[in-house]
Image (tube, rainbow, N blue to C red):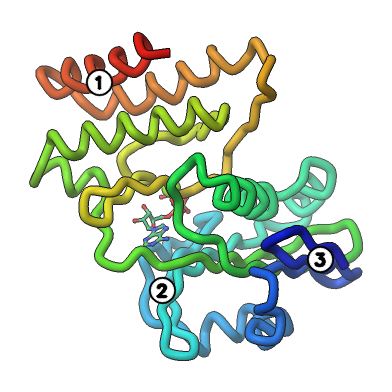
């Protein structure tokens, strides 16, 4: 059993479970049978495509809504691969916990997770986070308020740099706005860099290039100006 300030986690042969400290009892039924828990409390799907590696749904538990992400098992060879490399579910869970505690990046609160295992063999995994109610994706907000969208993106770009992380999928579907506050989601491919790592600049550029691909014309120029302002202030 391991505990840090905010998160509890426990590993056994059959599963790894983790949640906000003190909520172990509350999430007991989820820890025991996550798939059943998801179907019992399921409200609606945000994403449910056959053969997709992940399923995203909204669940309701004890009167509160949560965002639930299921990492589907893709067969024996996939299980074997992540046995050595580690699973996206786990790395994204630990990354979110770290960043949420640290406060440098604005993201939905990570609440609870289960990874089903058979010894070292990782199977399906389930992650529950705060549901950002009423959130608009950047791809939706841009049609309503382009200026706020670009400013929010620049704020997140600043945060990525301050935290020295490469998001690796920094695009409009992974940026949500509640009011004008931007949130970053989807940490499945995140990479952390140490303070002295010379590789960060190149990786950070890839994130910035990716988000710039989502714009053109005057909007792109405006975004580049905002990102440029950020660079000049360093
Ligand atoms: N905490 C949240 N609150 C509300 N909606 C969310 C939250 N997290 C994710 N979403 C919604 O779910 C969508 C998919 O989430 P996410 O990017 O984590 O999953 P994904 O499997 O990586 O999807 P994709 O393959 O499309 O990137 C997001 O684009 C967003 O619309
Ligand atoms: Mg995504």
User: Does label 2 point to a residue whose CB lies under 8 Å from ligand 1?
Assistant: yes
Camera-side residue of 127 and 7: 7
> Residue tagged by mark 3?
117
Relative to 147, does residue 183 appear above or below in the rendering? below
**Numbered badge on residue 58:** 2
Q: Are marks 2 and 1 in contact (CB under 8 Å)?
A: no
Q: Is residue 10 left or right of residue 34?
A: right
Q: Quadrant where the C terminus lies?
A: top left
Q: x%, y% of residue 174?
A: 38, 45
Camera-side residue of 116 and 60: 60
> Residue tagged by mark 1?
226
Q: x%, y% of residue 11?
A: 85, 66
Q: Secondary structure at mark 1?
A: helix
Classed neighbour count for the residue bearing mark 3: other residues with Cα under 10 Å, few (<14), some (14–19), many (≥20): some
Q: x%, y% of residue 33?
A: 69, 83
Q: Is residue 16 left or right of residue 197?
A: right
Q: x%, y% of residue 211?
A: 34, 28
Q: Residue at x 67, y 62 (%)?
A: 6
Q: Secondary structure at mark 3?
A: strand
> Does label 3 or label 1 sit earlier along the sequence?
3
Q: Secondary structure at mark 2?
A: strand
Quarter location, residue 193: top right
Camera-side residue of 178 and 36: 178
Q: CA distance from mark 2 to mark 1?
A: 34 Å
Q: Nearer the viewer, mark 3 or mark 1?
A: 1
Q: Nearer the viewer, mark 2 or mark 3?
A: 2
Classed neighbour count for the residue bearing mark 2: other residues with Cα under 10 Å, few (<14), some (14–19), many (≥20): many
Quadrant where ligand 1 appears? bottom left
Q: Are marks 3 and 1 in contact (CB under 8 Å)?
A: no
């Amino acid at each position: 059993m391991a505990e840090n300030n905010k998160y509890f986690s426990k590993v056994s042969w059959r599963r790894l479970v983790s949640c906000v400290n003190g909520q172990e009892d509350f999430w007991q039924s989820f820890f025991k049978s996550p798939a059943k828990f998801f179907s019992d409390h399921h409200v609606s799907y945000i994403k449910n495509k056959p053969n997709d590696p992940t399923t995203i749904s909204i669940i309701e538990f004890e009167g509160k809504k949560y965002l639930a992400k299921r990492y589907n098992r893709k067969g024996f060879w996939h299980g074997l691969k992540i046995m050595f490399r580690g699973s996206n579910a786990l790395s994204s869970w630990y990354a979110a916990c770290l960043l949420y505690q640290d406060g440098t990046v604005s993201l939905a609160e990570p609440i609870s997770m289960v990874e089903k295992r058979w010894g070292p063999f990782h199977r399906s995994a389930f992650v529950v986070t705060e549901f950002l109610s009423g959130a608009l994706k950047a791809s939706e907000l841009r049609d309503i308020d382009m200026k706020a969208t670009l400013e929010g993106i620049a704020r997140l770009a600043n945060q990525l740099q301050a935290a020295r992380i490469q998001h690796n999928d920094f695009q409009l579907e992974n940026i949500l706005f509640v009011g004008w506050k931007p949130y970053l989601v989807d940490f499945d491919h995140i990479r952390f860099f140490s303070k002295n790592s010379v590789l960060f600049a190149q990786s950070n550029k890839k994130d910035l290039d990716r988000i710039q691909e989502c714009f053109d014309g005057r909007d792109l120029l405006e975004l580049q100006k905002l990102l440029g302002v950020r660079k000049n202030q360093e």
